[in-house]
Amino acid sequence: MKPIRKIYQDAPDSIDIPEELRHQPVEIIIWPLSEQIESTGLLDENGWPQGFFEQTFGSLPDLPDREWQGEYEEREPLA
């Protein structure tokens, strides 16, 4: 079954649940669109949150060098 997504410009007092989804476990998410990052002006000229790269640069720990993998095996050439 496909999920149902509906955006309301003016949220109603109650929301109708389709008959095929009633009386079974469902998840309903209320996500206010007015609180998006774009509306707060916290994005840089490329659309990234301000300071994103400065905060995350170097966050990956130093990894050990890769161990020696051995020699390539010699194979017979294809005819």
Image (cartoon, rainbow, N blue to C red):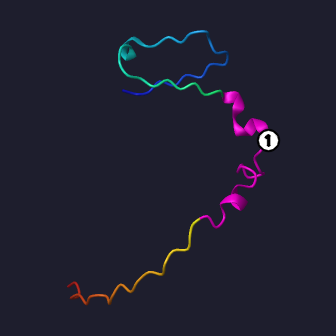
Q: Is residue 65 above or below residue 46?
A: below
Please state the extent of the stretch shown in magenta in the rendering: 33-59
Q: Is residue 39 magenta?
A: yes
Q: Position of residue 75 (x, y in %)?
A: 23, 87
Q: Is residue 76 left or right of residue 14?
A: left
Q: Position of residue 60 (x, y in %)?
A: 57, 66
Q: Is residue 24 above or below residue 35?
A: above
In this figure, what is the number of numbered marks? 1
Q: Quadrant of the C terminus?
A: bottom left
Residue, disc 1 = 41
Mark 1: few/some/many CA within 10 Å (<14, 14-19, 20+): few
Mark 1: amino acid: Gly
**Residue at 65% of width from left, 27% of height from top?**
32
Q: Quadrant of the N terminus?
A: top left
Q: Is residue 44 left or right of residue 14?
A: right
**Residue at 77% of width from left, 51% of height from top?**
44
Q: Secondary structure at mark 1?
A: loop
**Residue at 62% of width from left, 11% of height from top?**
12
Q: Is residue 31 magenta?
A: no
Please identify the quarter of the rendering in which residue 66 is found.
bottom left
Q: Nearer the viewer, residue 58 or 7?
A: 58
Q: Is residue 9 left or right of residue 25?
A: right
Please identify the quarter of the rendering in which residue 41 is found.
top right
Q: Position of residue 47 (x, y in %)?
A: 72, 49
**Residue at 45% of width from left, 25% of height from top?**
27
